[in-house]
Amino acid sequence: MKITTRILLIYVSLAIVSCGTKKAAIKDNTTATTAQTTKTESPIVRNLAFVQKVSDTKVYVQNIVADMSFTATMGDKNITVPGSLHMRRDGVIRLQLFIPILGSEVGRLEFTPDYVLVIDRMHKQYVKGDYNQLDFLRDNGINFYSLQALFWNQLLLPGASKVGEADLLKFEPKLDGTGENVPVSLKNGNMSYVWTANRNNGLIGQANVTYSSVAQGKSELIWKYDNFKSLGAKLFPSTQEFSFSTTATNKLKKNNIKIEMENLSTDDGWETESTVSNRYQKIDAKDIFGKLLNM
């Protein structure tokens, strides 16, 4: 279970997005004639309409709670444990891992807008720090709101807590093809984002986040969504799988996490803040990330 807790920390932390025709029927009083006029929308209007469709697929609930099966793969190591997911919009993302059968909590990972908290109950240790203290998150442009957008299956805008109506023009869909999937891209400095959205319903099936620099090498996060289920008035992906690869440690590392959720609900009867026992030892965030990255 020690490996499970560490894998959760590194993977999830790392890191660790109409046109047509107007038909006008014109009839005069003497001859029943119909005229059609076709008006082609400009590319800007067409693109904006599609990005709006994608944005409108997001769920509007304030809480997402689910039981989950958590599978972590690192090289030839594969671990599956039960767990739970609690998310409150703009408040917290919490993943808890349990010992199979017994159901006791073995580890907890909690993201809030202000800090990241990792609790290792097996060894009575914890890590708590803000995003600037955690080098890997800071260097790869990861903060709470970008993680929230990924978990909630939404577009994201780096440095912003949400994507507003005026921001939609910053996203570039490629609508020229005829396939079912449409890539929607966003470039921000060393970061590149590409969401793959369904042409018909706008649902996001995959998000690719790439960071590239001379100093830090290249890191790529691929987040896949599947098994959409009703949640409120919208659909939410109950299966999420994300893989992370990086050359930041001068050695290519690839890791994979899969979360399969059950019993999705919008329950709000839970606390957003975890309390750490004073019997637990606090570990320096930079030290533990260094150890994890060199496993």
Image (tube, helix red, strand yellow):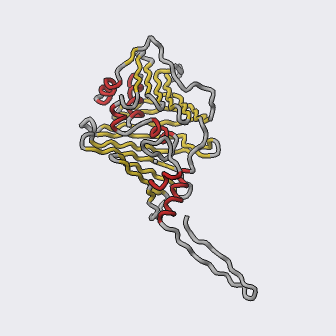
Q: Position of residue 137 (x, y in %)?
A: 37, 34
- Which residue is at 68% across, 77% downward? 25
Asked if residue 123 is positioned above or below residue 291 in the image, the reply reads above
What is the number of callouts on the image? 0
Position of the C terminus, as image quadrant, is top left
- Which residue is at 44% across, 47% downward? 207
Corner quadrant of residue 117 = top left
- Which residue is at 36% across, 36% downward? 255
Who is closer to the viewer here, 158 or 70? 158
Corner quadrant of residue 18 = bottom right
Corner quadrant of residue 67 = top right
Q: Position of residue 69 (x, y in %)?
A: 51, 32
Give the residue at the far front of this rendering: 166
- Which residue is at 58% across, 35% downward? 64
Asked if residue 196 is positioned above or below residue 107 in the image, the reply reads below
Position of the N terminus, as image quadrant, is top left
Asked if residue 125 is positioned above or below residue 147 in the image, the reply reads above
Give the residue at the far right of this rendering: 29
Describe residue 286's horizontal placement relative to residue 60 as left or right: left
Q: Position of residue 284 (x, y in %)?
A: 34, 21
Q: Position of residue 241 (x, y in %)?
A: 45, 40
Give the residue at the far top of this rendering: 279
Describe residue 25's horizontal placement relative to residue 208 as left or right: right
Describe residue 215's horizontal placement relative to residue 25 as left or right: left
